[in-house]
Amino acid sequence: MRGEFDIAVIGAGAAGLTAAGMAANLGARTLLVEERRFGGDCTWSGCIPSKSLIRAARLMRDLRGASDYGIAAGEAHVDGARVWQRIRAVRERVYDDADHPRHYERFGVVTMLGRARFVAPRRLAVVREDGGETNVTADRFILCSGSRPSLPKVAGLETVPYYTNETIFELERIPASLVILGGGPIGCELGQAFQALGTAVTLFHSGARLLPRDLPEVSDAVARRLRGDGIRLHLGARVDRVDRAAQGVVVRAAGVEAAAEALLVAAGRAPGSQSLGLEAAGVRHDASGILVDARCRTSARHIFAAGDVTANMKFTHLSEHMAKIAVANAVLRLPLRVDYDNIPWVTFVSPEAAHAGLTPERVQARGIRGREYRFPFPRIDRALTDGREEGMIRVLARESTGRIYSADIFGENAGEMIGEFALAIRNRISMRRIADTIHPYPTYGLGNRRAADQWYVRNTSPALIRLARWVFGYRGKLPVGLGPDEVL
């Protein structure tokens, strides 16, 4: 017996909106259920508000450094109320332009606000805002219920006021001081932004280095920059306790104590799968999320999952990619697979840190023998003109063919530059082809070509040059080999 809907999508964040829109456009009768607000974490408490805050912080940083460029800008003042006003206006615009239910209803999607849970393998009970309950059936399901902030086990945390990324953007002013728990992308990005806007920031991270997913040298470079910006950074410091104080909170770690007006908990994300009733549907899951295969299929063959609710890395762009794969399999029965070997990411600190391709662990596990090719930002002319010389490009490629396996960039506009390498890795575009492609000058992207040039330089055959000198009678010297840290 056919269900009321062909496809039911739970969650209207990046993954759910993508899945519902695609499914409806492919002719499936589609239901989209959202518990809170269409747009999800990215629009309301993630990418959009955080990058809006970072833009304000960068502008403040540029104004303070204007004298380096011969500009007398005067003393800048932060109007916290207007900072938050703009952030909320940007959120509302993104929601209205792209996330509002009317955009999806126009394609035939049936939208519903309420909390959905499985009561049978193909039946959902949706508890509406008014307390009433609606039961719906569907042939196939795509679970996109996202994630929520993960709270560390710290004594006293439940007794003090604290913020997470879901609440920090509801502030009305810029706090005078802030303690952050967590040195991942959220902690680093927001810590640096608040510091630039005048907040005294202290950051505790239990790990030995920030951004553990990135290369150690990138993590070290980010730590140096944060400390240079004035952030008090405590690495390898596991917080033991937090307590109320007259002016806010006191955070205590082994041998370290920090008091601040506000506390931000940025200790990772937990999957939003607890209330879905997965047992009734036969869907396997654990503390890391719903378990899916490369086709985004769960342990129940008619149920798929995409985005943060799964046990995979939690990025908006990966959520959208997984949603497309899930729809291709659920609606069209096409056996498409997620490209887990090439998931790019960017941490929007200043300078930015970006990665594409295999992680060092995957390179090692597969026994890939590649060679590193590097190019420093001080050799990129556009970086010199902009006064943004801090950074480097590092590419891991096969020495013989130039096939690229991974790329890491730390520097200005790294997030815009990394896309070229993601495209190259996905389509096996070699270092030679990048080096042979004309890149406009002067741009940061030219640095990618200059990095690829290093493959040419290091693969030049001395024997071939000797032959050319003999055949054509050239009288120049043989080229001197480059040292491991030299570039042309």
Image: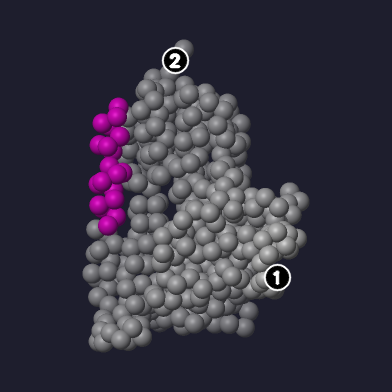
The disc at residue 2 is: 2
Amino acid type, callout 1: Leu
Q: Position of residue 110 (x, y in %)?
A: 32, 29
Mark sitting earlier along the chain (1/2): 2
Viewer can see residue 154:
no
Horizontal relation, residue 68 to residue 186: left or right = left
Q: Residue at x 47, y 76 (%)?
A: 389
Question: Is 250 rendered above or below residue 281?
Answer: below
Label 1 with label 2: CB-CB less than 8 Å:
no
Q: Split into 4 quadrants, where in the image is the C terminus? A: bottom right
Magenta residues, as a range? 90-108
**Residue farthest to the top, as pictured:** 1
**What is the quadrant of residue 63 in the picture?**
bottom left
What residue is shown at x 39% (from left), y 25% (from top)? 26
Between marks 1 and 2, how big is the CA–CA gap?
76 Å
Image coords of residue 226 (percent x, y): 49, 77
Q: Main secondary structure of the magenta part?
A: helix
Task: Identify the mark at residue 478; answer none if there is no mark.
Answer: 1
How would you rate the neighbour count of disc 2 (Cα within 10 Å): few for under 14, some for 14-19, many for 20 or more? few
Is residue 97 magenta-colored? yes
